[in-house]
Amino acid sequence: MHLREMLKRVLRRRDRGVSALEFAIVMPLLMFIMVAIADYGNALQQLVRLETAARAGAQVAFTHPGDTQFNVNDPNATLVKNTVLASLQGWPAAPTCINGAGNGVCVTYAAWCQCPQSGNAAGTSFAYDCSANSPPCEDFERYASVTVTRNYTRLAVVPISTLRGNVEIRVR
Protein backbone atom coordinates (compact mmCIF):
# COMPACT_ATOMS: atom_id res chain seq x y z
CA MET A 1 0.00 0.00 0.00
CA HIS A 2 2.84 2.30 0.61
CA LEU A 3 3.84 2.13 -3.05
CA ARG A 4 0.31 2.92 -4.15
CA GLU A 5 0.15 6.09 -2.03
CA MET A 6 3.48 7.25 -3.38
CA LEU A 7 2.29 6.69 -6.92
CA LYS A 8 -0.91 8.70 -6.25
CA ARG A 9 1.13 11.59 -4.86
CA VAL A 10 3.41 11.65 -7.88
CA LEU A 11 0.46 11.59 -10.27
CA ARG A 12 -1.28 14.41 -8.37
CA ARG A 13 1.82 16.58 -8.67
CA ARG A 14 1.96 15.88 -12.40
CA ASP A 15 -1.73 16.91 -12.74
CA ARG A 16 -1.01 20.25 -11.08
CA GLY A 17 1.80 20.88 -13.56
CA VAL A 18 -0.47 20.06 -16.47
CA SER A 19 -3.04 22.58 -15.26
CA ALA A 20 -0.39 25.31 -15.03
CA LEU A 21 0.84 24.44 -18.51
CA GLU A 22 -2.69 24.53 -19.95
CA PHE A 23 -3.25 27.91 -18.31
CA ALA A 24 0.02 29.25 -19.75
CA ILE A 25 -0.98 28.11 -23.24
CA VAL A 26 -4.60 29.28 -23.16
CA MET A 27 -4.16 32.62 -21.34
CA PRO A 28 -2.43 34.55 -24.20
CA LEU A 29 -5.12 33.40 -26.61
CA LEU A 30 -7.88 34.53 -24.23
CA MET A 31 -6.15 37.89 -23.72
CA PHE A 32 -5.87 38.37 -27.49
CA ILE A 33 -9.57 37.61 -27.93
CA MET A 34 -10.52 40.04 -25.15
CA VAL A 35 -8.38 42.84 -26.65
CA ALA A 36 -9.88 42.17 -30.10
CA ILE A 37 -13.42 42.40 -28.70
CA ALA A 38 -12.56 45.66 -26.92
CA ASP A 39 -10.98 47.00 -30.14
CA TYR A 40 -14.04 46.19 -32.24
CA GLY A 41 -16.30 47.70 -29.58
CA ASN A 42 -14.26 50.91 -29.53
CA ALA A 43 -14.36 51.18 -33.34
CA LEU A 44 -18.11 50.56 -33.36
CA GLN A 45 -18.72 53.18 -30.65
CA GLN A 46 -16.73 55.79 -32.59
CA LEU A 47 -18.51 54.86 -35.84
CA VAL A 48 -21.93 55.31 -34.22
CA ARG A 49 -20.82 58.66 -32.86
CA LEU A 50 -19.70 59.80 -36.34
CA GLU A 51 -22.98 58.68 -37.90
CA THR A 52 -24.96 60.52 -35.23
CA ALA A 53 -22.97 63.69 -35.91
CA ALA A 54 -23.58 63.30 -39.66
CA ARG A 55 -27.32 62.99 -38.96
CA ALA A 56 -27.21 66.21 -36.91
CA GLY A 57 -25.49 67.95 -39.83
CA ALA A 58 -28.06 66.54 -42.26
CA GLN A 59 -30.89 67.96 -40.14
CA VAL A 60 -29.30 71.41 -40.42
CA ALA A 61 -28.81 70.87 -44.17
CA PHE A 62 -32.48 69.94 -44.44
CA THR A 63 -33.61 73.17 -42.79
CA HIS A 64 -30.96 75.36 -44.51
CA PRO A 65 -30.38 73.88 -47.99
CA GLY A 66 -27.23 75.07 -49.78
CA ASP A 67 -27.17 76.31 -53.32
CA THR A 68 -24.55 74.14 -54.94
CA GLN A 69 -21.91 71.54 -54.34
CA PHE A 70 -19.32 73.71 -56.07
CA ASN A 71 -19.63 76.77 -53.81
CA VAL A 72 -17.01 76.31 -51.11
CA ASN A 73 -17.99 79.58 -49.42
CA ASP A 74 -21.62 78.52 -48.92
CA PRO A 75 -22.58 79.75 -45.40
CA ASN A 76 -24.80 76.70 -44.97
CA ALA A 77 -21.75 74.46 -45.39
CA THR A 78 -20.12 76.30 -42.47
CA LEU A 79 -23.32 75.93 -40.43
CA VAL A 80 -23.44 72.18 -41.14
CA LYS A 81 -19.74 71.77 -40.27
CA ASN A 82 -20.11 73.69 -37.00
CA THR A 83 -23.15 71.59 -36.05
CA VAL A 84 -21.27 68.35 -36.72
CA LEU A 85 -18.22 69.46 -34.73
CA ALA A 86 -20.43 70.66 -31.86
CA SER A 87 -21.99 67.19 -31.59
CA LEU A 88 -18.50 65.65 -31.47
CA GLN A 89 -17.26 67.46 -28.39
CA GLY A 90 -13.77 66.40 -27.42
CA TRP A 91 -12.78 65.47 -30.96
CA PRO A 92 -10.85 68.27 -32.69
CA ALA A 93 -11.39 69.26 -36.30
CA ALA A 94 -8.61 68.22 -38.66
CA PRO A 95 -6.50 71.16 -39.86
CA THR A 96 -6.16 69.48 -43.25
CA CYS A 97 -8.07 66.53 -44.62
CA ILE A 98 -5.96 64.10 -46.63
CA ASN A 99 -7.93 61.38 -48.41
CA GLY A 100 -11.00 62.21 -46.35
CA ALA A 101 -9.42 62.02 -42.89
CA GLY A 102 -6.62 63.84 -41.17
CA ASN A 103 -5.46 64.25 -37.61
CA GLY A 104 -8.97 64.86 -36.36
CA VAL A 105 -12.49 65.00 -37.74
CA CYS A 106 -13.14 65.94 -41.38
CA VAL A 107 -16.59 67.15 -42.42
CA THR A 108 -17.65 67.20 -46.06
CA TYR A 109 -20.91 68.84 -47.11
CA ALA A 110 -22.33 68.79 -50.61
CA ALA A 111 -25.66 69.99 -51.98
CA TRP A 112 -26.88 69.38 -55.52
CA CYS A 113 -30.00 69.25 -57.63
CA GLN A 114 -31.10 66.34 -59.72
CA CYS A 115 -33.71 65.78 -62.37
CA PRO A 116 -35.92 62.76 -61.75
CA GLN A 117 -35.78 59.97 -64.31
CA SER A 118 -39.18 60.89 -65.67
CA GLY A 119 -38.05 64.49 -66.30
CA ASN A 120 -34.99 63.54 -68.29
CA ALA A 121 -35.47 62.82 -71.97
CA ALA A 122 -32.76 60.17 -72.00
CA GLY A 123 -34.44 58.26 -69.15
CA THR A 124 -31.57 58.68 -66.70
CA SER A 125 -31.24 61.05 -63.77
CA PHE A 126 -28.32 63.44 -63.51
CA ALA A 127 -27.03 65.97 -61.01
CA TYR A 128 -26.43 69.62 -61.78
CA ASP A 129 -25.57 72.91 -60.11
CA CYS A 130 -28.66 74.22 -58.28
CA SER A 131 -27.71 77.84 -58.91
CA ALA A 132 -27.95 77.40 -62.70
CA ASN A 133 -30.09 80.06 -64.36
CA SER A 134 -31.97 77.56 -66.49
CA PRO A 135 -32.40 74.15 -64.83
CA PRO A 136 -32.55 71.25 -67.29
CA CYS A 137 -35.90 70.07 -65.92
CA GLU A 138 -38.96 71.62 -64.30
CA ASP A 139 -39.50 69.40 -61.27
CA PHE A 140 -35.96 69.03 -59.95
CA GLU A 141 -35.14 67.56 -56.56
CA ARG A 142 -32.60 69.02 -54.12
CA TYR A 143 -30.22 66.70 -52.25
CA ALA A 144 -27.60 67.14 -49.53
CA SER A 145 -24.83 64.88 -48.29
CA VAL A 146 -22.88 65.11 -45.04
CA THR A 147 -19.82 62.90 -44.58
CA VAL A 148 -17.80 62.79 -41.37
CA THR A 149 -14.49 60.89 -41.29
CA ARG A 150 -11.84 60.22 -38.68
CA ASN A 151 -8.70 58.11 -38.61
CA TYR A 152 -8.84 55.11 -36.28
CA THR A 153 -5.84 53.86 -34.33
CA ARG A 154 -6.40 50.20 -33.71
CA LEU A 155 -5.33 48.23 -30.68
CA ALA A 156 -5.01 44.79 -32.22
CA VAL A 157 -6.88 43.30 -35.13
CA VAL A 158 -9.45 45.75 -36.50
CA PRO A 159 -8.64 46.07 -40.22
CA ILE A 160 -10.13 49.58 -40.42
CA SER A 161 -7.95 52.69 -40.62
CA THR A 162 -10.64 55.30 -41.37
CA LEU A 163 -14.09 55.53 -39.82
CA ARG A 164 -16.81 57.23 -41.84
CA GLY A 165 -20.34 58.37 -41.08
CA ASN A 166 -22.40 59.44 -44.09
CA VAL A 167 -25.96 60.73 -44.53
CA GLU A 168 -27.63 61.69 -47.81
CA ILE A 169 -31.04 63.29 -47.75
CA ARG A 170 -33.54 64.66 -50.21
CA VAL A 171 -34.26 68.23 -49.21
CA ARG A 172 -37.00 68.98 -51.67
Image (tube, helix red, strand yellow):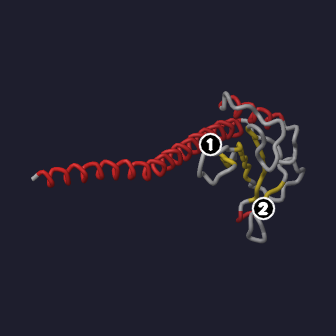
Q: Are marks 2 and 1 in contact (CB under 8 Å)?
A: no
Q: Amino acid at mark 2?
A: Phe
In the depicted view, which residue is nearer to us: 167 or 123?
Answer: 167
Task: State which tag comes first along the sequence, 2 or 1.
Answer: 1
- Circle 2 sits on which residue? 126
**Mark 1: secondary structure:** helix
* Residue at 66%, 32% in the rendered image: 88
In the depicted view, which residue is nearer to us: 26 or 79?
Answer: 26
* Residue at 78%, 61% in the rendered image: 126
* Residue at 44%, 48% in the rendered image: 27
Between tags 2 and 1, which lies in front?
A: 1
* On screen, residue 81 above or below 4: above
* On screen, residue 36 above or below 73: below
**Residue 32: image location, x then y, percent:** 51, 49
- Circle 1 sits on which residue? 51
**Residue 132: image location, x then y, percent:** 88, 50
Residues at marks 2 and 1, CA–CA distance in whole angstroms? 27 Å
